[in-house]
Image (spheres, grey):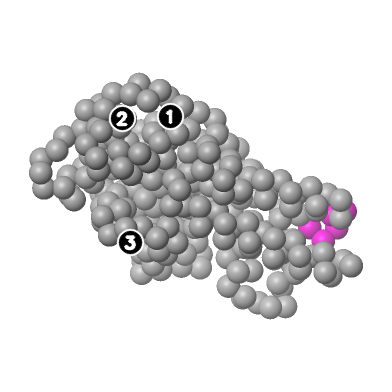
Amino acid sequence: MNWWGKVIGGTFGFMMGGPLGAVLGAALGNYFDSGMSLVAKDDALGAQGTERVQTAFFTAVFSLMGYVAKADGRVSRDEISLAEQVMGQMQLRPEQRKLAISLFEQGKQDAFPYAEVIEQFKRECLRRRNLIQMFLEIVTATALADGEMDPAERRVLETIAISLGYAKADYDRLVMRMSAQFRFSAGESPGNKLNDAYKVLGVTSDTPTDEIKKAYRKLMSQHHPDKLVSKGLPEEMMEIATRKTQEIKSAYELIMSKRN
């Protein structure tokens, strides 16, 4: 039984307690009318249970997307569309979509305990660096959805990144790479497409070809869908990881075609 089956199948001993459990419980309460309650057993599957991490990832992603979207005081149509796009890429079933929306709404609440949620999410991930990076990329995409990142959103995201073990300089590079990826995939500024391709890989036009190949292989490994799922990415999010690898590959191929 996968993580979703355990969520709706009544195997509530599987689910974590703490802030993530409370957020998920509240979201489930908005969906289920049967009065089911959660049994908080942090050690039900062991700290390294993949399905437990998948549940934590799903809960944290959609609730933090709501929190980040509200950070500048309003939730834009673009930010809502981005959340809907993520749900669409995941091909969520109706009941999963309702839960994702409810989690997004939980994150928008004034009393949302984002610091506690992040701290527990970090513990659940157990230093799975690539999984945490994917989490940051999805949540950061919310702030970039309307074409620019509001300073309030940036401050919140930097706090989240630092809490998850990222140095500010590392997160700055991630944002630069993602901003370029947005423009590259959207076909904006065709004259700057090659420049954006370099930024997608985190390199420059002066970087030696061998180093570009290393950067490309590293990014492809970090975003490999099967590897991420084995670390705790929900299976439904494989398509998101697949699209990222396709965009990275397209940027690399453009650079190589110009260099050759």
The spot of residue 163 in percent (x, y) is: 49, 35
Residue closest to the eye, 110 or 211? 211
Sequence-wise, the earlier of marks 3 and 1 is 1
Residue 74 is tagged as 3
Q: Which residue is mark 1?
A: 49
Type of amino acid at the residue the image marks with label 3: Arg
Residue interval drawn in magenta: 204-208
Q: Secondary structure at mark 1?
A: loop
User: Which of the image's four quarters has the N terminus?
Assistant: top left
Residue closest to the eye, 163 or 232? 232
Type of amino acid at the residue the image marks with label 1: Gly
Sequence-wise, the earlier of marks 3 and 2 is 2
Nearer to us: label 3 or label 1: 1
Residue closest to the eye, 107 or 23? 23
Q: Which residue is mark 2?
A: 14
Query: As drawn, is 200 to the left or to the right of 45?
Result: right
Kindly indicate whether the residue at mark 1 contacts the one at mark 2 (C-beta within 8 angstroms): yes
Can residue 84 be seen here?
yes
The spot of residue 185 in percent (x, y) is: 60, 69
Nearer to us: label 3 or label 2: 2
- Residue placed furthest toward the bottom: 190
Type of amino acid at the residue the image marks with label 2: Phe
The spot of residue 255 in percent (x, y) is: 79, 65
Q: Estimate how packed mark 1 is, as few (under 14), some (14 to 19) or many (20 or more) residues with alpha carbons within 10 Å.
A: some
Q: CA distance from mark 3 to mark 1?
A: 37 Å
Determine the residue positioned at 24% across, 40% down: 9
Q: CA distance from mark 2 to mark 1?
A: 9 Å
